Amino acid sequence: MKKILALVLVIVLAVAALSACGSSAQSAAPAAAPAQNDAPSGENAAVESPAATPAEVNLSAAYDNYLSQFSTNGTNGTLTVALSPDFAPMEFYDVAKSGDAAIVGFDVLLANYLAQELDMTLVLKPMSFDACQAAVQTGNVDVAISGFSWKADRAENFELSDYYIAGDNETQQSIICLKENEGKFTKPEDFIGKKIGYQGASLQQTLVEETFGELDVNITQVFSDLGTAVEALKAKQVDFLAVAHGNGESIIANSGDAIAFSGFDFEVDPKYENNVCLLKKGNTELVAKINVALAKALENDYYTGWYDASKVYAGVSTLDELGFDENGVKITD
Amino acid sequence: MTFILNIVKIMTKYWKVFLLQGIGYTLLLSIIAVAGGAFFGSLLALAKRSHLKILKALVNALVAVVRGTPVLLQLYIGVFVFPLIIPKLSSLPYIYSVSIVLIINSSAYVSEIIRSGIEAVDIGQMEAARSLGLTQRTAMMSIVLPQAVKNILPALGNEFIMVVKETSLASTFFVGELMTAYLKVKGNTYLTMECLFIVGVLYFALTFILSKILKAWEGRMKARA
Amino acid sequence: MPEVMLDIKNIYKNFGDLQVLKGVSTTVEKGEVVVIIGVSGSGKSTLLRCMNLLEEPTYGEVWMEGRLMTPVDPYLHFDVLRASNTYKKLVTGGLSDEEAIHKIKEDDLLKEKHPRTEGSEYAALMKKIYDESHIDINLGRQKMGMVFQSFNLFNNKSVKDNITLAPIKIGKQRLKEAKKRGEPVTKTAADIEKEAEAKAMKLLERIGLQDKADAYPSTLSGGQRQRVAIIRALAMEPDVMLFDEPTSALDPEMVGEVLDLIRDLVKSGMTSVIVTHEMGFAKEVADRVIFMHDGVIAEEGTPEEVFNNPKNPRCKDFLSKVLY
């Protein structure tokens, strides 16, 4: 019994030490804050929670502004939306918030917008990316909005909405590498003899295969999630990673100056550029309504503001870089 | 060095996600699963000894299916198919369906633990009790079960530790336990290895402390008998 | 006319395809000591275990003090057989009464059939016999004490609790039932406990183990355990004692103390059935000896007849091996 008590004590102490060390780091943070305003160094941003730290710039200000514009109580029933919130800035967690409000990002704004347009009440259902598709198929949720790109076999098995434009997250597709190779690779031929990794079953897979399929480039690596892929890059198991530009920015910002853009961007066929919502095959009524709403959003150019706000929230960019004032209001000229 | 620094930084910002939510939900799910499993597992074990052949066959089939399929698959079925059967579930958070699945899963294993625990008690104990004219029920409750408990408890402890680790699969539905904490923080920071290391240490600490507590408890049970 | 205590009628016992008992019938009278001998696997232990239904006979009936403990065996009741549809069909098919009965028995035509398929007359007769003579299996067992080869003391109970468990549990149950029926009760549950404990202490004194009352069985020697097992059975005040090789698991130096206790018991008039390999003891205490071979009673008689003048060659062979 004594031994166990001792053990519990040791662990409690260890935890206490960790959090103590944490709080001291936290108290030191405000001092460093001003510098961050001008140029967020990657490493700091890595741990800079999206959670608002009052002394600093409120990272969620712009996002919250957009979110507050949406009415939350529809009269037309609920719209349940599946999404996989491990994919900043498209959808991720703000650990300072709780419940549905903790799930934030571009797709969340879109979901709120759609619910408002359809006069429905939004319910978010977080789950893994694979589970999102299963949830739609079984009718467990009405729609999945989680950065899905258009694919032929997806179109076959699901009802897909029209495109929505998630800023440059999908339109710009890039290749990232270790810092030492930054900007040195600009055309496909530069990659001959190198190893390029990509996330399995993603748009990047299609792009890499289309671009490098004919060349003597090793593109065999497949990762099930981006985080693992980044580890492989750091461990030099691959030389390059094909990623959406927005994800690339997040990764670079969090890499502690270890990762950079290679200088190569893919030429993206317009059909791949954008994201779609997934609905159950045959649910044409809801798809039609969603498409009307999406057309309106495109026409009024809502997407850019949402995307920029989400990027700031995720700590990828700063407010003034993307043209917001410090209260998160877009500066129009 | 950056690895350690990153871990410190992650814990600075996200310690609540790991230590409060993560460990909290992992323990909550494990306790729900094991307590529910112990209760329903006992009922299943009783049903297995029933004279009703249909009941017996049904329970055996359930146990075979639960033991013969991956927990992840069971979770998918629980989350996406149960609401079709019980409409009420579809309006509740996934943690309800996930808990039900974990209880069913644990019940199946616990019923096997109880069955083998009872079978490990010398048949002569039951025979002696019956030869004195005691009913099956009295013999079971006064003689066989108290002896079976000594076999059952250690195995139940192991099951608890297994369940703690199995709850990680519930992260597929972001219910908030340790592996969900990993997904959340990794999704924000893209620092996969650091996050994995943190949850790894926490899982180990949890199971290690649990196994020590269970061992001490077992020792006390043995000393008493 | 001596009073019949235990009546075993045409017992068969199959374990799967293995026939262990192939039609055994015998009676045990009040005060009689019957010793069953035979080689291992001859079915002697199975026969003893069939007597208190620890093994359920495949066919045949066990009667305890005039009450039926097993289900009704239609093969033992001609009137029941004659009421069956199978019999009626055979007779209308041209067989004589005797031939029909023989055929039914020989071909086991009533086996595993639901009584209803043999007609309402058959079912009614079966039920009538059952209702008239059946006794609850637990009540029957309370009248029969059993002593096992491996003692089977309750490991989780102290010596005293081993002895008092059944008297207390059953006493309280009877009390509850009596109250339910509205009968006047003179005892309380506490009385039952006190009485059982007093009796247990008296029995322990009789075997000189009163100082072990609070010990657990694992701390006793084999001989002590078996003697406790015997008085545990006696605490239920049984009418018959069944001993299943009570000394086979004992170290040689402990056999004596157990045999002494059993000898005491039978000398005081306890009706007993004893399966044993102790031939000297068998010769000494038995009123009747049964030699089992290959699932049947191969020889039966007084100790003098069986031990000194066996007629069955198997029995002769067996005795020549164990006696000299």
Image: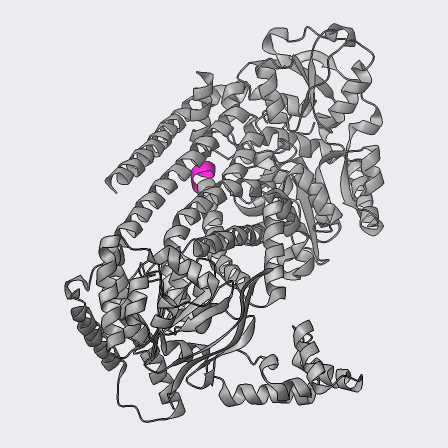
Question: Eyeballing the image, is B83 above or below A319?
Answer: below
User: Hey, which quadrant is residue A255 in on the image?
Assistant: top right
Please tell me in which quadrant of the rendered image residue A61 appears: top right
Which of B4/C10 is in front?
A: C10
Is C122 positioned to the left or the right of B111 in the image?
Answer: right
Q: Is residue B153 left or right of residue C201?
A: right
From the image, which quarter does the N terminus of chain A lie in?
A: top left
Residue A222 versus residue B94 in the image, above or below? above
Quick check: is C74 in the magenta stretch? Answer: no
Residue C156: image location, x then y, percent: 31, 59
The x, y position of residue B84, in whole percent, is 69, 57
What span is in magenta? B16-20
Residue C114 in the figure: left or right of residue C196? right
> Can you see residue B92?
no
Q: Describe residue C191's horizontal placement relative to residue C19 as left or right.
A: left
Taking the spot 65% from the left edge, 12% from the top edge, the residue there is A239
| A34 is higher (above) or lower (below) than C168 | above
Quadrant of the snapshot with the C terminus of chain A: top right
Residue A190 in the image: state x and y as whole percent: 74, 6
In the image, C320 versus C12, the foreground residue is: C320
Q: In this view, does A141 lie above or below C136?
A: above
The secondary structure that most of the magenta stretch takes on is helix
